[in-house]
Amino acid sequence: MTEELCFFNKSSLVIKAPKKSPLALRLVVLAFAMVCGVYICSICIKQISPHTTTANFMNIRVFDQPCNTSGIKPEDMPYVHFPNPETFSREECACNPVRDFAILSMQRSGSGWFETLLNSHINVSSNGEIFGSKARRANISAITQTLDKIYNLDWFSSASKNECNAAVGLKWMLNQGVLEHHEGIVEYFKKNGVHAIFLFRRNLLRRMISVMANSYDKSNKPLNGTHKSHVHSSTEAKVLAKYKPTINATTLMAELKHVDDRAARAIGYFKTTRHIVVYYEDVVKNPSKLREVQAFLGLPYRDLTSRQVKIHSGPLSNTVENWEDVQKLLEGTKYESFLRADY
Ligand SMILES: *[C@@H]1O[C@H](CO)[C@@H](O)[C@H](O)[C@H]1NC(C)=O
Ligand SMILES: *[C@@H]1O[C@H](CO)[C@@H](O)[C@H](O)[C@H]1NC(C)=O
Ligand SMILES: *[C@@H]1O[C@H](CO)[C@@H](O)[C@H](O)[C@H]1NC(C)=O
Ligand SMILES: *[C@@H]1O[C@H](CO)[C@@H](O)[C@H](O)[C@H]1NC(C)=O
Ligand SMILES: *[C@@H]1O[C@H](CO)[C@@H](O)[C@H](O)[C@H]1NC(C)=O
């Protein structure tokens, strides 16, 4: 097919060259036809070659010895994988077991920070909010196709570390199709042994303030005209913390309850999958929480680090415009503790 195409181009050009033209012109036309032919052939070959090499490579791998799984506990077997990516070779790590995970969270709950911590582990690749794109979560087949690609290590993002990954995943907000398509996702998680890591924030009042401040930042951009959801210096954090939102007292209680219910619903849906629930506040207070997360993912233990700096620190009363109203509303309710908690 390639060959035919090349000859066709050449001959048609040669035929079209006027017969009575001077020799020089004929030579120019001939040279032009040859250059075109070579160029087209080289493109054809380039397009074909990656497929040929992948095919060869896969043939070799099919006849490879299966990985030795004697070191893996029988109860862990459904949760480990030996992916065979299409886009690269895992080389000497081909038989390192890989676990699939998803960080299920809500906006402004510390999941960005949590993900940078996990990604500071040499064997972890968490690829960010992949389902922020609507097309990828349009229906369950779009979702599972995307997950297949991520868990086969064929998804490339700034976080991907390739060969020697021991855990691969993404950050996934509940409002990015998780609740909407929960049945299909739970089925996929169970079938493929995906680890669900719920990351929630206990203090939903602090979360609400962060949501309001972040949306203010989106429209006003006090940091030299750029919107920043996360910052890396305390000067930037101070600029962003200057804005004090006014909380709508009419809807406050209902909104807190709504967010609370969504988290509980999500945990309920996924209770039959392998999962853990992590609270942002616990990770802040006690870094050994991260040890638990690493054990859950079967990772060799490492100290994890992040460069992110907290935006709203200090007592909550300084971060809200109408603090007294908020205080009056929450005193004596089950959300009362939100008023005093440090984080
Ligand atoms: C698998 O690995 C174990 C050690 O983890 C070793 O004792 C065993 O002989 C290996 N089995 C095969 C078939 O290579
Ligand atoms: C699912 O969504 C994708 C992306 O929007 C679309 O191309 C595909 O046709 C949809 N499939 C079904 C079964 O609806
Ligand atoms: C983690 O990554 C290192 C370096 O790439 C590699 O040598 C090691 O085998 C990996 N560990 C696991 C458990 O995959
Ligand atoms: C804004 O830009 C100026 C100069 O480009 C820089 O010195 C300053 O630190 C920036 N401020 C912030 C808040 O990023
Ligand atoms: C509070 O929310 C309600 C319902 O959305 C709205 O009608 C009302 O105007 C809001 N109040 C303030 C002060 O923004």
Image (cartoon, rainbow, N blue to C red):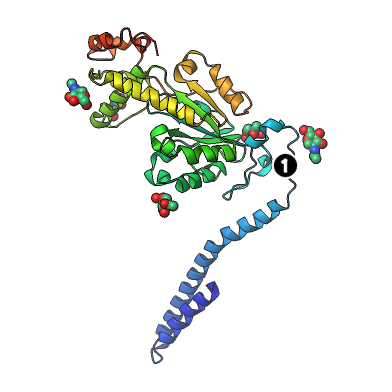
Indicate the quadrant containing the C terminus: top left, top right, bottom left or bottom right: top left
Q: Is residue 229 left or right of residue 269?
A: left
Q: Residue 23 location, x and y as percent?
A: 43, 87
Tell me the residue at 68%/35% (across/down): 77
Q: Residue 14 location, x and y as percent?
A: 45, 84
252 lies above or below 104? above
Indicate the quadrant containing the N terminus: top left, top right, bottom left or bottom right: bottom right
113 lies above or below 189? above
Q: Nearer the viewer, residue 236 or 80?
A: 80
Residue pushed farthest bottom?
20
Q: Residue 50 location, x and y as percent?
A: 57, 58
- What residue does disc 1 label? 67
Q: Nearer the viewer, residue 311 or 72?
A: 72
Which type of secondary structure does the marked residue at label 1 adopt?
loop
Q: Quadrant of residue 190?
A: top right
Tell me the residue at 33%/20% (across/down): 256
Q: Residue 323 location, x and y as percent?
A: 25, 11
Question: Looking at numbered disc 1 in the image, what kind of residue is underneath it?
Answer: Cys
Tell me the residue at 63%/44% (across/down): 90
Tell me the residue at 46%/45% (across/down): 140
